[in-house]
Amino acid sequence: MRRLLITSVLTSVAFVTSPHAGASSTISLQIPLSTAAHILGHNCHGIQQQDFASTLDAEESAVFGAVYLQTNCSQGSKSHIFQTWVSARWSYSGGLEAIGPMYNPPSNINLAARHSDDYGNVLTDTLSGPAGCSVAAVNTCHYRASLQWSAIPKPTNLAVQQNGDSLVATWTSEDPSAGLNVVTVTTPHKVIRLTTPTEKIVIPGVVPGTRYSINVSTLPLGHQLSDHEGVSESATTSIVSQPATIIATPPSTVSSDGADSHLARITWSGGQSGNSRSDGQQIRFFSSASDPTPVSTVTVSGTSHTCHAPNPGSEWWVSIRTHNQAGWSPWSPRVHVSVPASSDH
């Protein structure tokens, strides 16, 4: 599993992502100004913040840190500094998820802290300002740090095959449990985005004779579909679906239920739609198992039909066939359908 646990001195100011998928991206974290003002109870000519000792935890899909907030308020010759420390939790996409009090703020700041993991992700921190900087000297001392994501490699071995009226796409990820796989399916008429944690996806309802472009990329562990930082490059392929030359097969299972002396419910399943989705069924009603001429023929959709009996004790033999863009399937074997002689059964 793609797991990383990195601890270092961390501060941040803005959320920045790379404009190119597959390139590394730098993520900075901050407490929004409105939230900081609510915490301090004041916002006098701006609020300064410095963040330290954060932990990136892939298990939690979150970054944890300690944030120092300060604003300087003055009225006439009097001034007052409002300041506090808080603990914070951010999502991988940079959004603030939680804040809380911090009773033991960091006392030692290691400016040499720089950590990397097996995937090329790097956490660094810097300080700009004069010698002897302190955290409270927010106007001259600026603690800055960043997490640089190294995008995971794009999926490989992407292959797409048609199975009936569905496409089956398979690929190989760097690690099957690394993150969420994003599949983009493009046709002349629409674009569909699908997600899966596995290395396979089934795309149903294929239109015959249509070109499908398939793109597959992978998000890092903990990221969601709306996130873009760290996303891999896309593996791409295309396929033209087969023409509708394979007709549907008839239902292999047909059953009936004599609900009462006036109604019978017929259900079926097991038919194959061929190269295009089934769009209708026909039911033939016969007066006997050997009668060559049907009493009636009904066209329906779905996989069930309720018929009305002309008299209590009525019985028929029914046969069903399925339609798709290639035409009608053969008829299924006949099934006996009957209703009781009276409603007391």
Image (tube, rainbow, N blue to C red):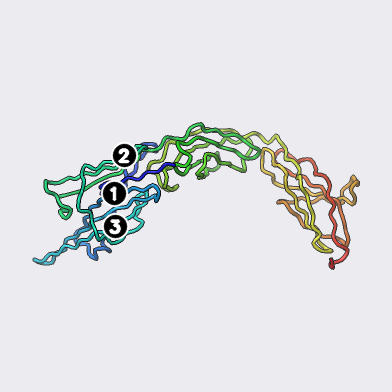
Q: Which residue is mark 3?
A: 87
**Front residue of this view, candidates 52 and 255:** 52
Q: Secondary structure at mark 1?
A: loop
Residue 343 image point, x, y percent: 84, 67
Residue 261 image point, x, y percent: 84, 64
Structural distance between the alpha carbons of marks 2 and 1: 21 Å
* Residue 231 horizontal side relative to residue 64, left or right: right
Asked whether the residues under the numbered discs 2 and 3 touch, taking CB atoms below 8 Å apart as contact, a structural biologist would say no
Residue 323's place in the image compared with 154, above or below, is: below
List the single residue furthest toward the bottom.
344
Asked whether the residues under the numbered discs 1 and 3 touch, taking CB atoms below 8 Å apart as contact, a structural biologist would say no
Q: Residues within 10 Å of mark 1 (few under 14, many from 20)?
A: some
Which quarter of the rendering shows the C terminus?
bottom right
Residue 298 image point, x, y percent: 79, 51
Structural distance between the alpha carbons of marks 2 and 3: 23 Å
* Residue 244 horizontal side relative to residue 230, left or right: right
Residue 210 image point, x, y percent: 60, 36
Q: Residues within 10 Å of mark 2 (few under 14, many from 20)?
A: some
Q: Which residue is mark 1?
A: 14
Q: Which residue is mark 2?
A: 116
